[in-house]
Amino acid sequence: MSHLELRARMTIRPGQLEGFKAHAAELMRLTRELDTQTLRYDWFLSPDSTQCEVHEAYETEQGLFEHNDHIKDARATLFRDYADNHHMSAYGDVSPQLIELSRVHAGGLEHYSFLTGMHPQPAV
């Protein structure tokens, strides 16, 4: 697998949906303006708008570390004011550094190695 994919899941605090959406837009702005290796950063809401899932993909693991540097303050505000229960899953090879980063910022990381699929390299 030549890139790293992640899924971040969180719950939106009751009464905080509009603030959550505004802050998600700020995280997206930072990502668009500053990141150089981000391939995907898509936000999805559950039908009742109480949960969010973010689908992320980076050219390399270093791309994720770059992204983290760009958004860490804004992400801290997101979880301080609008969201809880942050959990992440990674798909691809992960380093001990990534496991530690996720422990600090997301309560840990589930990670999976690519087994097989329609193509030798999974599509982003």
Image (cartoon, helix red, strand yellow):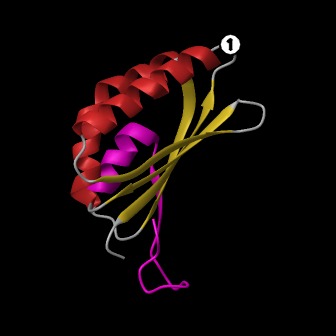
**Which three-letter amino acid code belongs to the residue tagged 1?**
Gly
Of 31 and 61, nearer the camera is 31
Q: Is residue 65 left or right of residue 85?
A: left
Is residue 119 on the magenta stretch? Answer: yes
The magenta stretch is 97-124
Q: Find residue 33 and report its horizontal and vertical position in percent.
A: 26, 34
According to the picture, the residue beneath numbered tag 1 turns out to be: 15
Figure check: 24 above or below 43: above
- In the displayed orientation, state which residue is furthest to the right: 48
Q: Residue at x 63, y 26 (%)?
A: 12
Q: Residue at x 44, y 41 (%)?
A: 106
Q: Find residue 16 and report its horizontal and vertical position in percent.
A: 62, 15
Q: Residue at x 68, y 13 (%)?
A: 15
Figure check: 51 above or below 109: above
Of 97 and 4, nearer the camera is 4
Figure check: 57 above or below 23: below
